[in-house]
Image (spheres, grey):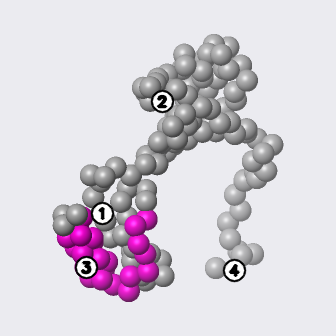
Amino acid sequence: MPISQAPRFNVEMFRTEHRHSRYEVEVDGGLPFDEVLKPGFWAHVGQQLRPRDFIEVWPKDNSWMAELRVIEAGPMFAKVALITKKQLEAKADDPLEVEPLQNGKFRVRRGPDIMKDGFASRKDAQRWIDDYAAGAKAA
């Protein structure tokens, strides 16, 4: 269908920096993550926040990061929704996984870490994992 015949919708478009803010918060590593999802956790900054604002939450040890979106805010509270939470440290017991790439190649990951990439086939990547595991057992 030509663009001139496409249905017209009532759409408003805005530059995002005029619509919401982005904040970064560093928390104590011992703080249970569920605490940052509670409205009362944000009581000290509730008046500063607006709906649609983003909040990046990082522990002091940088072992994970979370992205939150403010749903509602006011004096002494802010309701937030979890968008993403990622572990940033691979653990030694995390499994090695083969992951396809968009260019048709494959790579091996352990958690968020890329161990090796550029494999021509899944079989080559799996062979590398087998060799890696054998070397780890021998050590």
Q: Nearer the viewer, residue 136 or 56?
A: 136
Label 4: few (<14), some (14–19) or many (≥20) C-alpha neighbours in 10 Å: few
Q: Is residue 66 visible?
A: no
Asked if residue 128 is among those painted magenta in the image, a careful observer would answer yes
Which secondary structure lies at badge 3? helix
Q: Is residue 14 left or right of residue 116?
A: right
Looking at marks 4 and 2 on the same chain, the residue that comes earlier in the sequence is marked by: 4
* Residue 95 percent across, percent down from the top left: 27, 58
Q: Is residue 12 left or right of residue 138?
A: right
Residue under label 1, please give it: 96
Q: Amino acid type of disc 4?
A: Pro
* Residue 132 percent across, percent down from the top left: 27, 70
Q: Amino acid type of disc 3?
A: Arg
Residue under label 2, please give it: 29
Residue at the location (37% across, 64% down)?
109
Label 1: few (<14), some (14–19) or many (≥20) C-alpha neighbours in 10 Å: some
Distance between mark 3 and mark 2 Cα atoms: 38 Å
Which secondary structure lies at badge 1? strand
Distance between mark 4 and mark 3 Cα atoms: 50 Å
Residue under label 4, please give it: 2
Distance between mark 4 and mark 1 Cα atoms: 48 Å
